[in-house]
Image: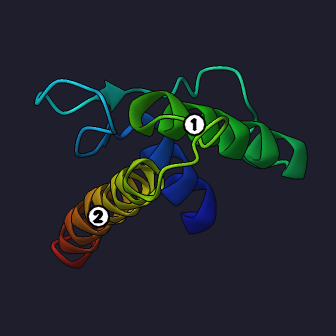
Amino acid sequence: MMRNFHLAIVAIAAIAAAPAAGQADADPVERVAVSSPDLASANGRRLLARRIGRATELACGSYAGKREHHEIDAIDQCRKRAKAEVARQVAAIDNQQQTRSASR
């Protein structure tokens, strides 16, 4: 149950990261819809993981056609920040849930 909760939170969390190479200074943000996948099933979790992967690529850019080290490094850093942001949001939600459970 908690695993499914985590996946749902990851999916609705914004994937925000630093700009990829060639992008403006505004941080890109992508949101992932979770209305259709059944997070209790392995297929649903895989679908959600693919959606998160696509959102990360949209926000951070693709490695396709990138040959310059600075371009690849920018994408790497963006993806690291995106992953950290999702983890931060999941931890915050987890803490909220634990606080609510403890107060019951």
> Where is residue 25 drawn, in percent x and y?
11, 30
User: To which quarter of the image does residue 30 belong?
Assistant: top left
As rendered, which of 82 and 66 lies closer to the eye? Answer: 66
Type of amino acid at the residue the image marks with label 2: Gln
Q: Answer with mark 1 or mark 2, whichever residue precedes in sequence.
A: 1
User: To which quarter of the image does residue 23 belong?
Assistant: top left
> Where is residue 72 drawn, in percent x and y?
48, 54
Considering only vertical position in the picture, is 14 above or below 81? above
Front disc: 1 or 2: 1
Density class for disc 1 (Cα within 10 Å; few <14, some 14-19, many ≥20) is: some
Q: Which mark is residue 62?
A: 1
> Where is residue 31 drawn, in percent x and y?
41, 26
Q: CA distance from mark 1 to mark 2?
A: 35 Å
Q: Secondary structure at mark 1?
A: loop
Considering only vertical position in the picture, is 80 above or below 9? below
As rendered, which of 82 and 71 lies closer to the eye? Answer: 71
What residue sits 58% from the left and 48% below the top? Answer: 67
Type of amino acid at the residue the image marks with label 1: Ser
Q: Which mark is residue 93?
A: none
Q: Position of 64 compared to 23: left or right?
A: right
> Where is residue 58 drawn, in percent x and y?
49, 27
As rendered, which of 71 and 10 lies closer to the eye? Answer: 71
Q: Which residue is mark 2?
A: 97
Q: Position of 60 compared to 14: left or right?
A: right
Position of the C terminus, as image quadrant, is bottom left
